[in-house]
Amino acid sequence: MSSTNSPNASETPKGRKPGLRSVQTTMLFRAVNPELFIKPNKPVMAFGLIAITLCVAYLGYLHATIENKKDLYEAVDSEGSTYMRRKTSKWD
């Protein structure tokens, strides 16, 4: 069996682009799925990645500092001055 297709049949025509940009879609579909039709913007992606990384690092910093302050409380000595003291157990 020989194929009757021309050698150029597998290539896309000159006027069409591969992907969803050339497909007929509704404006609602394009509004709901903009990532399918907008070209990637490298500087915006880099800024977003840095911003999210800094947010996660800040949350980690807050968690670490709260863990350190958890065992401290403000104590008052016999003269009336206050100072920070670590919680101790009576069993120690």
Image (cartoon, rainbow, N blue to C red):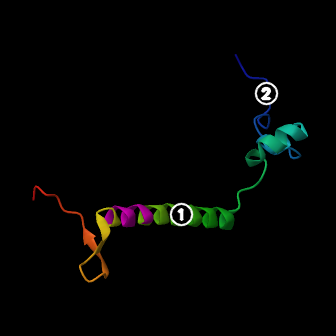
Q: At 81% from the left edge and 45% from the top edge, which residue is drawn?
A: 17
Is 79 placed above or below 61 here? below
Mark 1 is on which residue type? Cys
Is 17 placed above or below 48 here? above
Q: Residue furthest top?
A: 1
* Residue 56 percent location from the top left of the image: 49, 60
Q: At 79% from the left edge and 34% from the top edge, which residue is drawn?
A: 9
User: On residue 4, which mark appears?
Assistant: none
Query: Please, what secondary structure does the residue beneath circle 1 have?
Result: helix
Front-most of 86 and 51?
A: 86
Q: Residues within 10 Å of mark 1 (few under 14, many from 20)?
A: few
Res 92 → quadrant: bottom left
Q: CA distance from mark 1 to mark 2?
A: 57 Å
Specify the quadrant that holds the N terminus.
Answer: top right
* Residue 79 percent location from the top left of the image: 26, 83
Q: Is 68 displayed left or right of 49 in the figure?
A: left
Front-most of 30 and 18?
A: 30
User: On residue 55, which mark appears?
Assistant: 1
Where is mark 2, residue-wise? 5
Is 82 placed above or below 35 here? below
Say whether residue 55 is visible: yes
Say whether residue 12 is visible: no
Foreground mark, 1 or 2, reads: 1
Q: Is 83 displayed left or right of 14 in the figure?
A: left
Per the rendered image, the range of residues in magenta is 62-68
Say whether disc 1 or disc 2 marks the residue closer to the N-terminus: 2
